[in-house]
Amino acid sequence: MNLYNIKHPEQQVNFAQAVRQGLGKDQGLFFPEKLPHFDDIDSLLAMPLVERSQKILSALIGEELPVETLNAMVKNAFTFPAPVAKVEEDIYALELFHGPTLAFKDFGGRFMAQALAVVRGDGKITILTATSGDTGAAVAHAFYGLENIEVVILYPKGKISPLQEKLFCTLGGNIRTVAINGDFDACQALVKQAFDDEELRQAIGLNSANSINISRLLAQVCYYFEAVAQLPKEKRQQVVVSVPSGNFGNLTAGLIAKTLGLPIKRFIAATNANDTVPRYLNSGKWDPHATVATLSNAMDVSRPNNWPRVEELFKRNGWDLTELGSGALTDEETEKTLQAQYAKGYLCEPHGAIAYQLLKDQLQADETGIFLCTAHPAKFKESVERILNLELPLPEALDKHNKLPLLSDEMENDFETLRAYLLK
Ligand SMILES: *Cc1c(COP(=O)(O)O)cnc(C)c1O
């Protein structure tokens, strides 16, 4: 597999290098030079999830990895299902929260851990990543206990749910977690600064595991096929997919799936009040506001770092950005939506609710809609219980960690402090 740096196309790497480096020169994102096209989508859709995903990832990654190696990676990573639930006539939920940390990031995080273990080479590796909640949990769990891999996770202090925090800040071992006095964008900026520091990068074998790592995106392509595969055959032709978006990795993966030939008519980029992209699509002006805290905190991102990949895909495919649907919901609208969904018999959480409502608003008569449910409702227990006036039992995975003490360090939003910490 050949990839190029979107900012500096002359910088080219293979899959192993892209996985190890994460980011290219000048923080440029790596992007596949060629994307395959599947002509016989029906037979692909007829396969079970793991087998189909092995086919898809093997076509994407190519001969660089032996087939048996890749097949084992997929099998070890995808150990849980991605069921589709019918919510109402022509509207389906793709539930991506049945993995160990109850969010869709388990797919990408677990595949990346497998990939890195295969391509790592010798020497020390430090995974440094910023999280607005779910990435941290998925990465921490996917890498926990792997030999010679140190993980450092930055998150905005007080801005993620207490349960989320418990899920990844109680592991210890090779997982260090740091509560930063700042918002998610500040955490992300610190990570970028660390990657720009060549000396630091070499000294600790720096690697990022956030959604800029190509291995995560490639893994996520697979569940879009799974979604369409579970629709009744007669509903597969006019599919619209609504994606609750923060850093826009999930949407990028969906667009790659479409490029491979999966019949998806169009996508809807759904955001909360951090609506840089919907405003950009309406006005043509890229104008990020300060990040605001919302109910759907995993989407509290005003400078989505995967956006250049979305634009690259549109450009390369000759698609027009006007074909990309979008919209944003306020917290108040999100609450109303959750209540309306619950009244219909579907228990959702704020991220999925936003995708659902925008899908419902924009779906046309002859279309079939799928919205992505990116987290288990119990991950947002406090808000879901308050909004729906009910009690949610904690799933076992959460309950276990909830009883353990937090092991996080605290830090000011200061690069020199972080640098010293990483070198320690
Ligand atoms: C990370 C996350 C998102 C946003 O996904 P992106 O790929 O960053 O756009 C949405 N919902 C939940 C629950 C998440 O954890």
Image (cartoon, grey):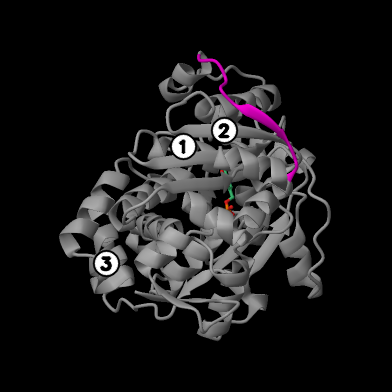
- Residue denoted by label 2: 177
The first of marks 2 and 3 along the sequence is 3
Secondary structure at badge 3 equals: helix
Q: Is residue 89 above or below residue 412?
A: below
Give the CA separation, mark 3 to mark 1.
Answer: 26 Å
Question: Which stretch is magenta?
Answer: 404-414
Report if residue 37 lies within the magenta region.
no
Residue in the image at 57% along x and 20% along y: 406
Characterize the magenta stretch by its predominant secondary structure: loop
Determine whether, in the image, residue 194 is placed left or right of residue 168.
right
Measuring from the top left, give residue 296's x and y in whole percent: 67, 41
Nearest to the eye among marks 2 and 1: give it.
Answer: 2
Nearest to the eye among marks 3 and 1: give it.
Answer: 1
- Residue denoted by label 3: 58
Q: Closest to the observer: 326 or 166? A: 166
Report if residue 411 lies within the magenta region.
yes
Secondary structure at badge 1 equals: helix
Residue in the image at 48% along x and 59% along y: 213
Q: Which mark is residue 140?
A: 1
Residue in the image at 33% along x and 39% along y: 147
Give the CA separation, mark 2 to mark 1.
Answer: 9 Å
| Residue 153 sits in quarter | top right
Q: Are marks 3 and 1 in contact (CB under 8 Å)?
A: no
Secondary structure at badge 2 equals: strand
How many residues crowd mark 1 within 10 Å: few (<14), some (14–19), many (20+)?
A: many
